[in-house]
């Protein structure tokens, strides 16, 4: 019996009614830890720089620390959740996240803040990877793409309002207070995990038994062997790095270069979250008519064209000011939102029995590439947005080329089917 034969309702998700709705909303709240952790304190970057007496590039390294932590944490949490279930690793990681966030609030130096962010990323990683694995446990096919797109509404809500919330909180508390807010959210998620996810295990013992003794190395060998998955992982990571290059630079560009106030910055940044939701919903609608692969390619082409338009705007039409920068940037973010659900669905569909490990590789790739890319623009300074935009264009163009080559190669190499791992190993 393969993963495709498992009835969706038997994976631990409540079958109907209020409990099912609570489960889905709880999953969305779990995924929201990512935008809250990364976006809530973005408006405080100038204050962090002043308060700790450091440079903009080192402040951006607080993002890098979180990215590296999330990369390593996902590589642990994903395979572990395949082996022992989703709920217990999730609860432990949330405790780690909460304690690390308290450490960030007390950090007396930029070095210790970066360290705290690394540990915070380790804990947050489980939320990201296990949340994606839970989706794959419960749905498959086009329904999975639509499920991911619907979760993006909750996720996008926090993307929209996290910077605005951070900016408003900064009027009454310091940047350290923002970490206390995140610590409170961590406590809330710990309680949520105890009340919801421990009672609705989506990877129960009978399902784990289908792995037939497969090891983590078995999973990695299959996932990273011949096939399209490994190239999706690389392309997704490079695409994400392009977006994070913008996000890590946004506070300095919007506030220092274009002269926006923290509140105005939060509103402009929140607009990107809204159009990202729109992009995800377009992807969900298209999934009823065309394959996720075609959606991915169309989205990447739109992403690269938007980056080209952005570069032309900041180099040839600087007089257009902030509006000339914002319009192509919104197109860029919409395309990014369109790609995300389809890319995840394309990667996870063939790998139900190793969904945690597959999701961990997808997420870790995002974090690793973003960790290296996010501080690069800061090295060139923010006297102009040109350096940031060039880096974005180079990264997204590279990701497009990889995707096109990968999907072309897929025509000659079949994707692994939904069969127990030992059977797949025998075929290979």
Image (cartoon, rainbow, N blue to C red):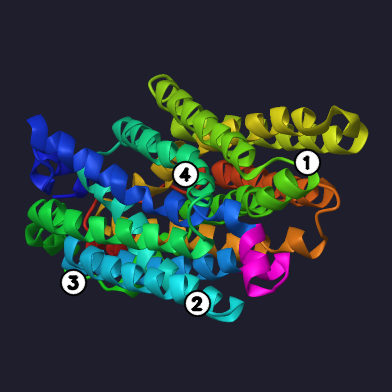
Q: Is residue 289 left or right of residue 68?
A: left
Looking at this rendering, what residue extends furthest in the front direction? 172
Residue stretch in magenta: 46-61
Q: CA distance from mark 1 to mark 3?
A: 57 Å
Q: Which residue is mark 2?
A: 107
Among numbered discs 3 and 2, the one appearing first in the sequence: 2
Vertical relation: 80 (above or below) 228: below
Among numbered discs 1 and 3, the one appearing first in the sequence: 3
Q: CA distance from mark 3 to mark 2?
A: 44 Å
Vertical relation: 187 (above or below) 265: below
The mark closer to the camera, 4 or 3, is 4
Which dot marks residue 213? 3
Among numbered discs 4 and 1, the one appearing first in the sequence: 4
Among numbered discs 1 and 2, the one appearing first in the sequence: 2
> Mostly what secondary structure, the magenta segment?
helix
Q: Are marks 2 and 4 in contact (CB under 8 Å)?
A: no
Q: Which residue is mark 4?
A: 165
Which dot marks residue 258? 1
Among numbered discs 2 and 4, the one appearing first in the sequence: 2
């Amino acid at each position: 019996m393969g993963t495709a034969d498992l009835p969706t309702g038997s994976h631990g998700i409540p079958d109907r009614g209020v409990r099912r709705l609570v489960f889905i909303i709880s999953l969305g709240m779990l995924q929201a830890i990512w935008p809250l952790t990364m976006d809530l304190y973005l408006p405080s970057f100038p204050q962090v720089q002043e308060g700790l007496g450091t440079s903009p590039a080192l402040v951006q390294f607080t993002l890098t620390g979180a990215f590296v932590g999330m990369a390593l944490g996902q590589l642990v949490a994903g395979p572990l959740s395949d082996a022992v279930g989703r709920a217990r690793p999730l609860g432990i990681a949330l405790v780690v996240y909460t304690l690390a966030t308290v450490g960030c609030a007390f950090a007396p130096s930029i070095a210790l803040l970066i360290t705290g962010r690394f540990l915070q990323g380790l804990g947050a990683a489980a939320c990201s990877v296990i949340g994606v694995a839970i989706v794959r446990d419960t749905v498959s096919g086009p329904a999975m793409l639509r499920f991911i797109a619907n979760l993006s509404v909750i996720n996008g809500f926090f993307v929209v309002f996290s910077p605005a919330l951070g900016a408003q909180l900064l009027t009454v508390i310091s940047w350290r207070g923002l970490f206390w807010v995140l610590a409170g959210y961590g406590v809330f998620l710990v309680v949520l995990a105890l009340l919801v996810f421990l009672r609705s295990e989506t990877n129960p013992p009978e399902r784990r038994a289908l792995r037939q003794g497969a090891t983590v190395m078995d999973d990695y060998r299959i996932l990273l062997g011949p096939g399209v998955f490994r190239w999706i992982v690389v392309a997704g990571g490079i695409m994400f790095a392009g977006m994070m290059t913008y996000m890590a630079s946004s506070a300095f560009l919007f506030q220092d270069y274009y002269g926006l106030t923290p509140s105005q910055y939060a509103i402009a940044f929140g607009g990107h979250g809204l159009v990202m939701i729109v992009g995800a919903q377009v992807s969900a609608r298209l999934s009823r008519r065309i394959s996720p692969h075609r959606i991915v390619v169309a989205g990447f082409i739109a992403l690269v064209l938007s980056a080209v338009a952005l570069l032309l705007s900041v180099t040839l039409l600087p007089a257009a000011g902030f509006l000339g920068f914002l319009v192509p940037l919104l197109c860029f973010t919409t395309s990014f939102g369109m790609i995300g659900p389809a890319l995840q669905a394309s990667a996870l569909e063939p790998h139900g029995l190793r969904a945690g490990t597959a999701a961990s590789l997808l997420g870790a790739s995002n974090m690793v590439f973003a960790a290296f890319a996010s501080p690069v623009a800061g090295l060139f300074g923010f006297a102009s947005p040109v350096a940031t935009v060039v880096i974005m264009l180079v990264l997204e163009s590279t990701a497009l080329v990889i995707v096109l080559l990968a999907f072309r190669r897929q025509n000659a190499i079949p994707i692994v089917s939904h069969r127990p791992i030992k059977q797949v190993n025998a075929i290979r």
